[in-house]
Image (tube, helix red, strand yellow):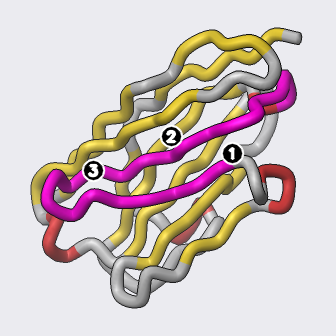
């Protein structure tokens, strides 16, 4: 089992920055991939950024390329999402996800473990 706890969400103005954190516990040595997803009410959960543990591959949804950066601190078992130049359309609940089998990329079906989410709100 893997437990994920997100933090770092909040309210910012357009153009501002936030850094989300996701701390993993449990079978962290077995993780093969981690990712950030986001969701707004009545919409599908969307993959934002993903990182493969085996080769360090990262992948971003087009709308956040150049603004968001996914990274990991392996010693702290923590995944980060640095979000710069935030825009109102980035407003959502952000979730951390992890899996122990393969590389899930930005597909929500590729992840077995999920955090409870942290809210990001961006005002214009």
Which residue corresponds to the image point at 76% horizontal and 56% vertical from the top-left?
66
Q: Residue at x 77, y 58 (%)?
A: 65
Q: Between 7 and 41, which is closer to the camera in this rendering?
A: 7
Q: Residues within 10 Å of mark 1 (few under 14, many from 20)?
A: some
Coordinates of residue 122 in the picture (x, y in percent) = 75, 17
Asked which secondary structure carries label 3, the reply is: strand
Q: What residue is rendered at 36% in x and 78% in y?
A: 53
Quarter-of-image position of residue 116: top left
Q: Which residue is mark 1?
A: 45
Which residue lies under the disc numbered 3?
A: 78
How far across and how far down the image is residue 71, in percent? 44, 59
What is the distance, in whole Å, between disc 3 and disc 2 at their CAs? 14 Å
Is residue 86 rendered to the left or right of residue 115? right
Callouts 3 and 1 close, C-beta under 8 Å: no
Task: Compare marks 2 and 1 and give the one earlier in the sequence.
Answer: 1
Q: Determine if the magenta segment contains residue 74.
A: yes
Looking at the rendering, the stretch of residues picked out in magenta corresponds to 68-89
Q: Name the residue carrying label 2.
A: 95
Nearest the camera: 71 or 6? 71
- Dividing the picture into quadrants, the one containing residue 93 is top right
């Amino acid at each position: 089992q893997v437990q994920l706890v997100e933090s770092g969400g909040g309210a910012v103005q357009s153009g501002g920055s936030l850094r989300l954190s996701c701390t993993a516990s449990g079978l962290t040595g077995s993780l093969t991939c981690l990712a950030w997803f986001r969701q707004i009410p009545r919409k599908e959960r969307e993959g934002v950024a993903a990182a493969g543990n085996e080769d360090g591959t990262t992948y971003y949804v087009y709308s956040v390329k150049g603004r968001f950066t996914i990274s990991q601190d392996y010693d702290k078992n923590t995944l980060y999402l640095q979000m710069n130049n935030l825009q109102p359309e980035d407003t959502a609940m952000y979730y951390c996800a992890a899996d122990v089998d393969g590389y899930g990329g930005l597909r929500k079906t590729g992840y077995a473990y999920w955090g409870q989410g942290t809210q990001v709100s961006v005002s214009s």
